[in-house]
Image: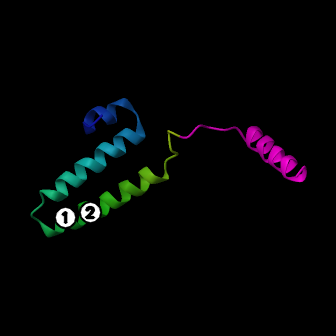
Amino acid sequence: MANLLEAAKSGDKRATLIALRDKLAETIQNCDSGRDMASNSKRLMEVMAEIEALPDPTQVKVSKHDRLKQKHENRQSKSNI
């Protein structure tokens, strides 16, 4: 979803931030004003930080119960060695 407007209308925060990141990068690349480049560069860095702070959608979500169960099973298998 490359279009910023479409991404924003979708309500998908990650897609919107990615489209905004791409738009800002394009604006910076074509910028002639040092002042505009500085403010857009700062905003680009903020948007990139927001993207990195979002949970990775490709990771499988594991419940707290399952994490604790796995931790317990790992301890059991190590004590049996």
Q: Which image quadrant is residue 6 in?
A: top left
Q: Residue at x 26, y 39 (%)?
A: 4
Q: Position of residue 51 (x, y in %)?
A: 42, 50
Point out which mark residue 37 bears: 1
State which quadrant residue 59 falls in.
top right
How far apart are the two marked residues, 1 and 2, measured between alpha carbons?
6 Å
Number of residue marks: 2
Q: Which mark is residue 41?
A: 2
Disc 2 crowd, CA 10 A, few/some/many (<14, 14-19, 20+): some
Q: For mark 2, give the secondary structure.
A: helix
Of the 4 image quadrants, the one containing the N terminus is top left
Name the kind of residue labelled 1 in the image. Met
Residue 4 circle label: none
Residue at 30% over, 58% down: 44
Location of residue 33 in the rendering, given as x and y in whole percent from the top left corner: 11, 65
Q: Position of residue 2 (x, y in %)?
A: 26, 37
Confirm whether the magenta stretch covers residue 69. yes
**Residue 53 relative to residue 64: left or right:** left
Outermost residue to the left: 32
Name the residue at the front extreme: 81
Amino acid identity at mark 2: Ser
Residue drawn where x is 23% and y is 54% of the image: 25
Q: Is residue 18 left or right of residue 66?
A: left
Q: Nearer the viewer, residue 24 or 9?
A: 24
Q: Principal SS element in the magenta part?
A: helix
Q: Residue 5: say if magenta.
A: no
Mark 1–mark 2 CB contact (< 8 Å): yes
Residue interval drawn in magenta: 59-81
Q: How is the image coloured?
A: rainbow
**Alpha-carbon neighbours of circle 1 within 10 Å: few (<14), some, or many (≥20)?**
some
Give the residue displayed 37% in from the left and 39% down from the top. Answer: 15
Residue 29 rendering spot, x and y as whole percentages: 16, 58
